[in-house]
């Protein structure tokens, strides 16, 4: 009875949609028969006159639990205390009906959250939703010329993921009530979900069109998908994403199931002490001593490829270009070279500058001033590390390289870096950058992979034989090839517009 009541919203929305399109009544059959029909349907060619209606939780996602997604909203949108409250209430959620449990999670996660500043649905959740999409469900959904998705979760949570990355045409979800620009934590009544829009207008079909309606779900709809069937579903491969997920935000690097979230809260006090210890060791001791000590605490790094001593003279200054995974990247370049370097950065917080064991200098985004500054440091014999992407990227993609670095020296040393963390991301677009070092050092384990590539002759740029843009693209391709990353023409501005709704500019240094 509880399950039927919990699915009443989806069923009523779906049946309303079918009646609107004058769909023919379909008979209900056993789940096994219907699942085999779904498999057969997903293998057919795309039908240009077909509208596919899908229940997100039942027919698209492999997991039935909605708890991790509300935990992400609570942690990333409300903070640790809100997330802890939701975790404490989890035993209660297991004892009540699905509908009441949903209302409790919505209230705890959204109550008091400012509507205008809420971007978790577009910047954080898409990554975790995409990792949970089943290949079989996606292939069936993708056969229709028009795709409609229905969800029990609030529309603000799922709309960005469905429209931006799965190219869904219409998203039907629960609407949240608000008061003076803040979410109250209550949802609109089920009957009001469909008010305010015209389905005919949304999916752009005409009255006279001959269309076929296909729906699938794990509840009482047309094609039934049982939990046993979904256990053998495969995750959706990255190469099959309609639109690639290049940027995402948030601090949580794992799926916050009840077990994982409990472990995180238990780890926090130990992680804070460990972070302080790691910081003291890293700042006070030389690299040859601190590296093995830090490795014992789970803070490791691995050198790939040829040893730097075989490519670079130890006594000479080095002008290196690196990928940007976190703001700690230049430190590992310094460790690899076993010599002090100066990191040229743009949006490094004051706290990170103070704690950094290497010297840093800020860019002003004035091409002439920045070029003169870097040329001066190189002429003084300093080893300079430049991050031409201008910002970090967590996924296996490289952003556009600024061509300025190719005009300052006759040769450069490209460095390919990648980092793996176990609990927290050390970067943020919408949060406080001052906490970046703390979150990185609090990880139970992390590993940097560093590879020094062959030197690149950039004297051809000064001679006019090659443009600086072509040279920058060449260096980007070489680093991308070494890492197995895809090169893009996206920039810092693109990242911040997607994740934070601004152009990512910062105030000039005083």
Image (tube, grey):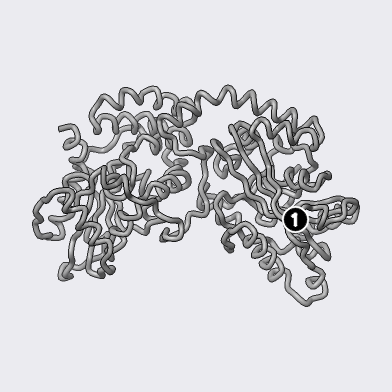
**Who's the residue at 60% across and 27% down the image?**
271
Q: Residues within 10 Å of mark 1 (few under 14, many from 20)?
A: few
Residue beneath the point at 32% across and 59% down: 139
Image quarter of residue 218 = top left
Residue sitting at x 42%, y 29%: 259
Q: Is residue 153 left or right of residue 396?
A: left
- Element type at mark 1: loop
Residue closest to the far bottom = 465
Residue 392 showing in the rendered view? yes
Residue for point 79% across, 76% down: 464
Q: Is residue 454 left or right of residue 238?
A: right
Nearer to the camera, 255 or 504: 255
Q: Which residue is mark 1?
A: 306
**Quadrant that contains the N terminus:** top left
Residue 119 is at least partly visible in this image: no
In the depicted view, which residue is nearer to us: 170 or 278? 278
């Amino acid at each position: 009875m509880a399950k039927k009541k919990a699915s009443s919203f989806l069923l009523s929305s779906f049946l309303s949609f079918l009646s609107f399109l004058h769909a023919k009544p379909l008979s209900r059959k056993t789940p096994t028969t219907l699942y085999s029909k779904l498999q057969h349907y997903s293998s057919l060619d795309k039908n240009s006159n077909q509208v596919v209606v899908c229940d997100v939780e039942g027919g698209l996602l492999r997991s039935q639990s909605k708890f991790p997604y509300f935990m992400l909203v609570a942690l990333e949108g409300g903070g640790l205390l809100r997330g802890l409250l939701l975790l404490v209430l989890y035993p209660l959620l297991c004892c009540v009906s699905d509908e009441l449990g949903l209302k409790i999670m919505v209230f705890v996660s959204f109550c008091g959250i400012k509507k205008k500043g809420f971007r978790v649905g577009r910047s954080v959740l898409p990554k975790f939703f995409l990792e949970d999409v089943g290949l079989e469900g996606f292939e069936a959904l993708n056969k229709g010329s028009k795709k409609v998705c229905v969800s029990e979760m609030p529309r603000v949570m799922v709309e960005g993921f469905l429209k931006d990355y799965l190219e869904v045409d219409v998203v039907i979800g629960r609407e949240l009530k608000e008061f003076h620009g803040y979410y109250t934590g209550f949802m609109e009544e089920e009957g009001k979900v469909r008010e305010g829009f015209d389905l005919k207008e949304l999916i752009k079909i005409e009255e006279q069109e001959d269309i076929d309606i296909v729906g699938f779900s794990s509840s009482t709809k047309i094609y039934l998908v049982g939990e046993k069937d979904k256990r053998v579903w495969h995750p959706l491969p990255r190469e099959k994403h309609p639109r690639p997920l290049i940027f995402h935000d948030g601090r949580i690097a794992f799926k916050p199931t009840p077990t994982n979230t409990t472990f995180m809260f238990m780890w926090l006090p130990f992680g804070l002490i460990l972070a302080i210890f790691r910081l003291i060791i890293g700042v006070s001791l030389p690299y040859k001593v601190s590296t093995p000590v830090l490795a014992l605490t789970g803070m490791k790094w691995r050198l790939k490829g040829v040893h730097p001593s075989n490519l670079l003279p130890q006594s000479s200054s080095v002008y290196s270009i690196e990928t940007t995974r976190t703001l700690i990247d230049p430190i590992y370049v310094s460790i690899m070279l076993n010599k002090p370097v100066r990191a040229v950065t743009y949006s490094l917080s004051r706290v990170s500058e103070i704690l950094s064991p290497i010297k840093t200098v800020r860019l002003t985004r004035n091409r002439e001033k920045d070029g003169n500054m870097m040329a001066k440091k190189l002429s003084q014999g300093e080893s300079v590390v430049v991050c031409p992407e201008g910002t970090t990227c967590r996924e296996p993609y490289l952003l556009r390289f600024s061509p300025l670095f190719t005009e300052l020296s006759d040769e450069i040393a490209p460095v390919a870096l990648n980092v793996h963390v176990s609990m927290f991301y050390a970067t943020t677009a919408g949060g406080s950058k001052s906490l970046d070092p703390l979150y990185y050092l609090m990880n139970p384990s992390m590993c940097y992979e560093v590879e020094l590539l062959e030197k690149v002759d950039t004297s051809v740029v000064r001679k006019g034989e090659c443009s600086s843009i072509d040279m920058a693209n060449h260096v980007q391709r070489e680093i991308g090839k070494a890492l197995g990353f895809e090169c893009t023409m996206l920039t810092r501005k693109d990242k911040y517009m997607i994740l934070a709704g601004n152009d990512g500019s910062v105030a000039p240094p005083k």
